[in-house]
Amino acid sequence: MKDTARDSVQATENLKHSGTNGVYAILPCNGLDKAAGAVSREVALQLAERTGSEILCPVFYRVAEARYNRLAGERPLLVIDGCATRCASKLAAENGLKASKKLTVTEEAKQRGIELGDALRLDEAGCSLAKALATALLDAEAVETAEQKAATAFPEHFEYETYQKDKFLFRLPKSGFFFNENDVWVLADGNRARVGLTDYLQQTLSDILFATPPAVGTVVEQFGELGTIESAKAVMEVVSPVTGKVVAVNQALAASPELINQNPYEQGWLVELELADFEKDRELLLDFAGYLPVLKRKVDQFQVR
Amino acid sequence: MNEATFMGVPRSRIDWSPRIDYAKCNDCLECVEFCPHQVFEVREAEMPKLIVKNPGNCVVFCRACAKTCGVDALSFPNKNQTTLLIKQVRKEMGGR
């Protein structure tokens, strides 16, 4: 079997396993350094009580690796970070655990217009935020699959131009695609479009560990945030090349984010959008001929760190 | 690097770089560690310790350093205004 075909079968298998009914192994931040730590811990407790999920204590994890690694292997892993320092995510990555879902409390609080304050003890606002986050997570799981509209039949393979520097080879699809200078592509078909990272961006990020797409139904503006991609090196925001509404996300990425590394233009696409005004967006997009020199310039300046 | 451009517009005409809220910044320097473009500078003996030294090196529309900030001390200019400005300058330059 060809590698890509095998990967696809594997991705489908993994997806089946991620049908969780909300039962997770949960690795939360429970840090005593900020209010968000107490909220993270409370979200984990709520989910454990309501679904029978099991909690991995991040402190105990340091001395009980084997037990927790086994637990994380048996169930999909939910990582709850308190803040952008992402201690829980880093702990998961250090232990080679693959998260199937993630939550960052400070970001969720911000989206809901909630100030967490400096108090370390969980107050009433923190408690109700935790409850709301746990509920939202369980509800979203039920809705996500139902809402996802059938992905449009985009071509599965493309012809590429390549540009090589040292041992790095960068692919660029020859036609149909448009790019922003933030290295994100869009492929439109009528008023629907697929979006993903360019080969250059996935290679600078190196091994991608987690993709967080926006929820189906989210409206995003051109150059706004279209989810995040987390690699061993960093968390990068995806800068949207277009304005539109998210109508589908690539669900295979939840179990196999490495599809982005394998081919970010084909199986590694990120989301599908209903376009608002592609003609207007195109004013600030580059086609193949326009992006190729940008790619070459970036590659020539790129230093592997 | 004066010839740097974004969508054909000279980078020097686009005001896009992180703003540091010193009331929140705790000098953890995660942003410095992250940014590969030397936008920030750390001045060990001075106050404030962290400054935006090279705003022109910042990638237009990139907000990635803010994602590393545990205390949410980094913000960016308004994206829509920046987009409008880029379009306007492109028009001035002859619709490139």
Image (spheres, coloured by chain):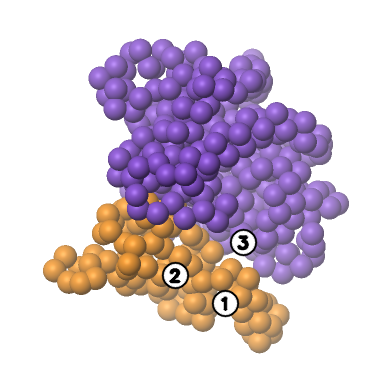
Quarter holding residue A239:
bottom right
Quarter holding residue A280:
bottom right
**In front of the other: A175 or B47:** B47
Do pointers 3 and 2 mark residues of a single chain?
A: no
- Is A25 drawn above or below residue B5 in the view shown? above
Do pointers 3 and 1 mark residues of a single chain?
A: no
User: Which label was assigned to residue A223?
Assistant: 3
For the colour orange, the matching chain is B
Furthest-bottom residue in view? B92
* Residue in view at x 75 percent, y 51 percent: A245
Q: Residues within 10 Å of mark 2 (few under 14, many from 20)?
A: many
Q: Position of residue A147 (x, y in %)?
A: 77, 36
Residue denoted by label 1: B9
* Residue in view at x 49 percent, y 33 percent: A43
Residue denoted by label 2: B17
- For the residue labelled by badge 1, is the local secondary structure a helix, a strand or a loop? strand
- For the residue labelled by badge 3, is the local secondary structure a helix, a strand or a loop? loop
Q: Amino acid type of disc 3?
A: Phe
Chain of residue at mark 2:
B
Q: Position of residue A218 (x, y in %)?
A: 70, 49
Q: Is residue A263 visible?
A: no
Q: Position of residue A95 (x, y in %)?
A: 35, 25
For the colour purple, the matching chain is A
